Amino acid sequence: MSSTFDTIANIIAETCDIPRDTIKPESHAINDLGIDSLDFLDIAFAIDKAFGIKIPLEQWTQEVNDGKATTDQYFVLKNLSARIDELVAAKGA
Amino acid sequence: MRLEYFQLIDRIAELNVADRTISTEATVPTTNTIFEGHFPGFPLMPGVLLIEAMAQTSGWLVVATHQFKRMAFLAAVKDAKFRMFVRPGQKLSVTATLAHEGSGYAVTHASIALDGKPICDATLTLRVLDFPNDEMRLRMREAAARVGFPNEVAADG
């Protein structure tokens, strides 16, 4: 798996005190790992810092609330990794 | 301060929504029953109440950012440091800067100074929600008037 996933998984493990080996690319941050919105805010800040980006958390939350996106698109970790890669690429563009 | 009513802030000194900053004044009362326990013979303003002063200051900034349509509730306190004792009668200057706003949360960097010297600081997370009922919103408007919340910001549409 990409280093993006590894970085995110390490951040989640450290921020939420979740054993690293239980965090898989298919894990859903909320449904599988039990991460709540308050903890996810810390994770988002740590990801921002690690990758030099700004996760549009408000936009993502709004899209999910409006039914325009599913939580899987943003909170299944392999999908989250892909979103982060997109943001990093957009920053370099 | 009126500690028995949990009013930690006396007055909003400056509020700049565009710059996402606020400063407030808070004078510690000269006498209060809290000082009988904290501590007997050596009265000190409790650190937890200094955190509350920073939280209330941060809260007014968040409420202003939302033009009084939403309320802020303390959700997390990080990296709180207390650098000096605060004694009865001292006049504190509390400041907060909004570092994040969105996704249902606001994060502020808050600090308290006494005569320009840093007293304490912390990073606070506040949950931002609609006012749970009309009474709370009305009471908060009254509290806003008491602390000098700017009228031009208080418009709630």
Image: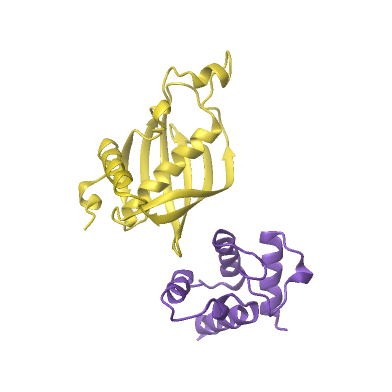
Chain colours: A purple, B yellow
Residue B117 horizontal/vertical position (percent): 48, 35
Q: Residue at x 55, y 33 (%)?
A: B47
Above or below, B47 relative to A90: above
User: From where the camera sits, is residue A86 visible?
Assistant: yes
Total numbered labels placed on residues in the image: 0
Q: Is residue A88 above or below residue B113?
A: below
Taking the spot 77% from the left edge, 64% from the top edge, the residue there is: A19
Q: Is residue A3 left or right of residue B52?
A: right
Quadrant assignment, res A39:
bottom right
Asked whether B11 or B132 is in front, the reply is: B132
The residue furthest bottom is A93
Q: Position of residue B94 (x, y in %)?
A: 42, 39
Give the image location of residue B111, x and y in percent: 48, 42
The quadrant in which the N terminus of chain A is found is: bottom right
In the displayed structure, B20 sits above or below B112; it is below
B126, above or below A44, in the image: above
A87 relative to A9 in the view: left or right? left
Residue farthest along the top direction in this orientation: B41
Q: Residue at x 31, y 43 (%)?
A: B140
Furthest toward the right, the residue is: A21
Residue B83 coordinates in the image, percent (x, y): 57, 35
**Is residue B118 in view from this perspective?**
no
Compare residues B50 and A53 and report the one nearer the observer.
B50
The reply, left or right, for residue B139 in relation to residue A61 is left
